[in-house]
Amino acid sequence: MPPKTPAPRTTTSLETQAPDMEGSPEPLEQRLYDLLSPFLEVAQEHGSNQVPLAEQSKAMVLCENLAFLIRHNQASYGKLIGVGDILVATKNWDLRTKGADGVICVGVYINGNHNYTYCLVRVVMRSLDKIIDKLAECVEPLLAPFCPGL
């Protein structure tokens, strides 16, 4: 019998856009993108359910910035952070699924040493606002020390 050919692997936009030196995606960036992908705004024009390229790009840059901050803060977590240590949590998410206006909370958290969970970034916002945009607004001030003069 001839050997079985493996099924082709599907890729996300991040995998095709952000390879590391070995040609595979950076694990932290990919984990963040996967966790944040449900928050991407889908284009509703002409019955399309596709995420616009501009929205994907914003999410990819956000994931790269979050991964940078995780790596920068590595020592404070007390252990080497792996993809399983990155979490996203939401509060009052059901408002958004119903299209109702209200207040929700979305956060990116890191499991550190001694069973302690660190908040990397958290945003409290209106349920109908764009989550990727709001998270990016919260990340910008955290990057200021690395971009003096801007």
Image: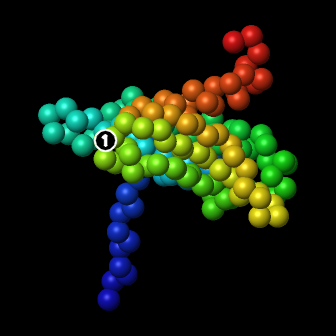
Residue at 61%, 46% in the rendered image:
108
Residue at 35%, 73% in the rendered image:
5
Residue 106 percent location from the top left of the image: 54, 44
Residue at 82%, 64% in the rendered image:
114
Q: Where does label 1 land, which residue?
A: 99
> Please, what secondary structure does the residue beneath circle 1 have?
loop
Residue at 38%, 71% in the rendered image:
6
Q: Looking at the image, which is closer to me, 49 or 11?
A: 49
- Looking at the rendered structure, the kind of residue marked 1 is Gly
Residue 122 percent location from the top left of the image: 61, 40
Q: Residues within 10 Å of mark 1 (few under 14, many from 20)?
A: few
Residue 140 sits in which quadrant? top right
Q: Is residue 134 left or right of residue 65?
A: left
- Way the structure is coloured: rainbow
Residue 129 percent location from the top left of the image: 42, 31
Q: Looking at the image, which is closer to me, 145 or 133?
A: 133
Q: Is residue 19 left or right of residue 149?
A: left
